């Protein structure tokens, strides 16, 4: 019995369509049919019951059982492959948007290198549109982004929730103090503008900066109130250099994006588990 036969049968049983199975596995329809027939011959069992002359079919009782066990076999196969991968140097290509790169990537990369020293990393920082393009070209294995636009048909899951607040050197009035914000067009600036509109706050002065780091440094020096992620200022807050100005807060999700085949039984799935714990 060959694993290819199991893979073709399990995929067919899942998609319930010969053409879709052929496209998904990048095999011809006759090849899929041959795999199913060989598996049936090997087992001496009928696994599918065709309906007339078209492509529709139903699983037999034996087919249902083989489908369930076949899924387990494929998962075991992927796990074994991951063991092989763990004993070799693996290239992991991570793409991230600029904001996620600033906030999450440094600590995440540190943990990857600590737990998986055999992984060789390639880090790519792009805007959202470029990340999507690189995913489609299979030049990125895992992407970390702030939005979900254009991410079909990839797997998308929330792995962290960012907390955006106003921070200052000491308690200051948002209505009467300069606000230090990202430039127009930035995702962080959009969140800030939405919050100001919802709270009906008219700033007396806005200082624009194209860097989260610069905004933090200006706020630490008492030159205004910065709108920043908690991830960016957690050390300064713990050291008392900055204080959050309550109650104004906005939450935004960060997403991990990856191909479906990376979800189970691969070194990529191990890294995703680490990312979930990390957040």
Image: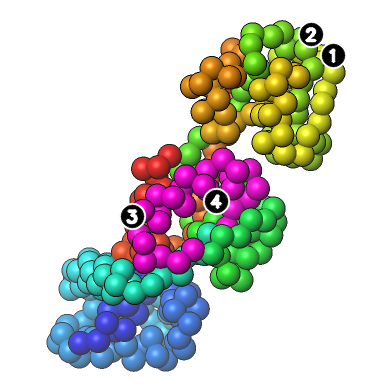
Crowding near pointer 4: few (<14 within 10 Å), some, many (20+)? many
Q: Earlier in the sequence, mark 3 or mark 1?
A: 3
**Residue 204, label in figure:** 1
Mark 3 vs mark 1, foreground winner is 3
The percent position of residue 78, horizontal first and vertical second, equals 30, 70
The crowding category of the residue bearing disc 1, from other C-alpha atoms within 10 Å (few below 14, some 14 to 19, many at least 20), is few
Mark 1 and mark 2 residues within 8 Å of each other at the beta carbon:
yes
Q: Residue at x 48, y 56 (%)?
A: 155
Q: Position of residue 79 (x, y in %)?
A: 26, 68
Instruction: For marks 3 and 2, give the CA distance.
Output: 48 Å
The stretch in magenta equals 95-121
The correct choice, above or below, for 112 with respect to 200 in the image is below
The residue identified by callout 3 is: 115
Q: Is residue 94 left or right of residue 125?
A: left
SS for callout 4: strand
Q: Residue 184: say if magenta.
A: no
Q: Reading the chain from its start, which is encountered first: label 4 or label 2?
A: 4
* SS state under label 1: loop
Residue occupied by mark 4: 144
Q: Nearer the viewer, mark 4 or mark 3?
A: 3
Point out the frontmost of discs 4 and 2: 2
Mark 4 vs mark 3, CA separation in Å: 20 Å
Q: Work out how far the residue at label 4 is from the one at label 2, CA to CA, in angstroms.
A: 36 Å
Q: Residue at x 49, y 63 (%)?
A: 121
Does residue 163 appear in this view?
Answer: no
């Amino acid at each position: 019995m060959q694993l290819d036969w199991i893979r073709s049968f399990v995929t067919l049983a899942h998609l319930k369509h010969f053409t879709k199975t052929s496209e998904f596995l990048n095999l011809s329809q006759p090849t899929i049919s041959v795999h199913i027939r060989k598996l049936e011959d090997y087992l001496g069992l009928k696994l599918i019951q065709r309906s007339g002359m078209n492509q529709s079919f139903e699983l037999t009782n034996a087919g249902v059982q083989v489908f369930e066990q076949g899924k387990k076999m494929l998962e075991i196969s992927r796990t074994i492959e991951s063991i092989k991968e763990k004993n070799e140097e693996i290239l992991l290509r991570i793409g991230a948007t600029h904001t996620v790169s600033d906030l999450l990537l440094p600590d995440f990369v540190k943990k990857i290198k600590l737990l998986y020293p055999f992984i060789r990393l390639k880090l790519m920082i792009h805007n959202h549109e470029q990340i999507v393009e690189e995913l489609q070209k299979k030049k990125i294995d895992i992407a970390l982004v702030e939005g979900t636009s254009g991410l079909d048909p990839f797997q998308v899951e929330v792995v962290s929730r960012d907390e955006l607040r106003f921070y200052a050197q000491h308690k200051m009035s948002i209505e009467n103090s300069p606000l230090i914000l990202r430039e127009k067009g930035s995702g962080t600036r959009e969140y800030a503008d939405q919050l100001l509109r919802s709270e009906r706050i008219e700033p007396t002065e806005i200082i624009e900066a194209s860097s989260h780091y610069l905004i933090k440094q200006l706020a630490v020096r008492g030159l205004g109130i910065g709108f920043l992620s908690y991830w960016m200022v957690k050390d300064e807050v713990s050291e008392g250099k900055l204080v959050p100005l309550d109650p104004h807060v906005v939450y935004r999700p960060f997403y991990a994006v990856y191909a479906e085949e990376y979800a189970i039984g691969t070194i990529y799935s191990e890294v995703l588990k680490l990312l979930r714990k990390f957040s």
